[in-house]
Image (cartoon, coloured by chain):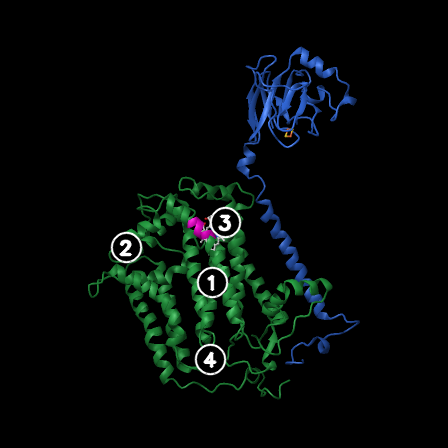
Amino acid sequence: MSFPWAKEYKPATEFGQWMDEKLPLPRFIYNSLGAGYPAPRNLNYMWNFGSLAGIFLVVQIVTGIILAMHYAANANIAFDSVEHIMRDVNSGWMFRYAHANGASFFFIAIYLHIGRGLYYGSYKAPREMIWLLGVVIYLLAMATAFMGYVLPWGQMSFWGAKVITGLFEAIPLVGKPIQELLLGGFAPDNAALNRFFSLHYLLPFVMAGVIILHIWSLHIPGSNNPTGVDVKGPQDTVPFHPYYTAKDGWTLGLALIFFSIMLFFLPNFLGHAENYIPANPLSTPANIVPEWYFWPWYAILRAFTVDFLFIPAKLLGVLAMFSAILVWFFLPWLDRSPVRSGDYRPRFKKFFWFGLIPCILVLGYCGGAHAEEPFVMMSQIATAYYFAHFLIILPLLSRIEKPEPLPNSITEAVTGKPLEQAS
Amino acid sequence: MATVETADSATLDDEAGGVRRRDFINIAAVSFAGAGAVATVFPLVNQMNPSADVLALASIEVDISAIETGQAIKTSWRKQPIFIRNLTEAEITEANSVSLTELRDPESLADRTTPGKENWLITLGVCTHLGCVPLGAAQGEVKGEYDGYFCPCHGSHYDTAARIRKGPAPTNLEVPEHEFLSDTVVKIG
Ligand code: HEM
Ligand code: FES
């Protein structure tokens, strides 16, 4: 594991020495986040979002545990208990807004982190496992955020729960029983609320566990980098600490400034006013939309409006929505190009910036809009492109594309001098 | 190993006596983050304090017109029992006959009641030992060796002024802040 030139942990104190013999936790930290982890010297800012997502997970856990101290998971009083948090609990409003906006910041970080992987080919050998675990983390995050949004038991909470569990109803034959099993009833009620709370509390800790595996598997090959070229010698790396701890610290500071702006000045900007109306099973809000981070997937769900080959439109939408994410599990084997970084793949680069990214933005926009024309048609075109990108364009490109010449080493790419001379 | 031409501590720094310019940035950044962390920790802890709705119920008004001389009632204030006792002449005399120096927690009956209303003894029904509810407020309960209250948990005896006389409790039953709004209504808290 790691590179042979990684700095060796040397306890500075006698106590450190004693610890190192009994439980080498400081050594473990040193080797994974400290000076003992050599990281490529050319990482750009896109490499900052993994640690940022981790920090926002911690923010969610800390604020979430606090909310759970004051929240009551009972359909009769859940809404009131959230208002109690907002009005009565000391600084309760701050924790609730921090938790609600923290979820958005977590997803911003994780989307940039995933996008980085997609562009720089971080999913390719030898990093497939890191990527697969990342997709698992993302799925867990979606489940967590969905169930969290149900907890305040407002109108959007209730109807969101109803619509999302309704997706399972689309499954032929067993759909209805599955939906009833998930809800513990025929519509969202106390049983559903309680199990969602239980799982909403649990899943972030499961995520933390999978993140540990994610980082463990990262430290076997080490980080990818903007050239996608393997590290070839000590000149290609710098110790993680202080170089990347300082760099991560700086973007953390920036992120916290933006977070504070949202938290203290625009706390409800990303929310829906509708969710300040208590859940009412007898009246559906005019436009049910999930939180912004689900919009692209929601657009894919709604893009299917006609039955096809005897498959009902509803089932198609559900299958497409789940496949849109599940296709990521196959990505390392769909894109066979040996060149990792998009910087050296002229055609891939164009398809990425002018195909995939606009396509996801369009899906995102349509997912948040009313389900009417022209948005339905736009979602249909974008959905088609989305799948084409992964299932047709990437496999084809890896055959026909002629990549640009790769630098001989990271050091050469950065300094212009060959690896042997730069030192 | 000198790797790249990035800052290798020995080459760039070392201005005077091992003090590096970067140390200043380092200390400034860490102090700033530290101050921010302390400012964040305060609300993180303070949220556990009683919330506004709990504090809003912090005082109650009790109608005492129905309590006969020699009787006591139990009521609840801040989710804790309160004893309100209308002392008899004999109980008042008994309380005043004790010399303060004999007491573990010296206080006179006058110290514990409102002037002109010395017959109204208002205390928390919470034993100062470990918090049980002492007996003696309701009719027929044991009042202990000193005719006031008796805590059955570990045997604390309180006298007619609810002062600790015998047993493990360290102090007298606590007298909450209270005020007579009229002859028949007392506000506690
Ligand atoms: C990545 C981790 C997490 C995400 C993405 C997340 C997301 C959310 C979201 C979107 C809401 C609804 C916010 C609103 O509109 O009010 C919510 C509510 C809630 N969450 Fe989380 N959460 C996470 C972790 C946690 C943890 C670890 C706990 C408990 C230990 C927790 C406890 C709660 C509680 C009690 C509520 C209801 C109060 C409220 O609605 O503000 N959350 N969560
Ligand atoms: S609690 Fe009353 S004597 Fe111990």
Do labels 2 and 4 touch, CB within 8 Å?
no
Q: CA distance from mark 1 to mark 4?
A: 23 Å
Disc number placed over residue A96 in the picture, else none? 3
* Residue under pointer 1: A108
Magenta span covers which residues? A196-201
The answer to whether residue A339 is left or right of residue A162 is right
> Vertically, is A179 above or below B167?
below
Ligand 1 within 8 angstroms of badge 3 C-beta: yes
- Point out the tag, 2 or 4, that comes first from the N-terminus: 2
- Point out the tag, 3 or 4, that comes first from the N-terminus: 3
Q: Residues within 10 Å of mark 2 (few under 14, many from 20)?
A: some
Secondary structure beneath dot 2 equals: helix
Disc number placed over residue A343 in the picture, else none? 4
Q: CA distance from mark 2 to mark 1?
A: 33 Å
* Residue under pointer 2: A175
- Point out the tag, 1 or 4, that comes first from the N-terminus: 1
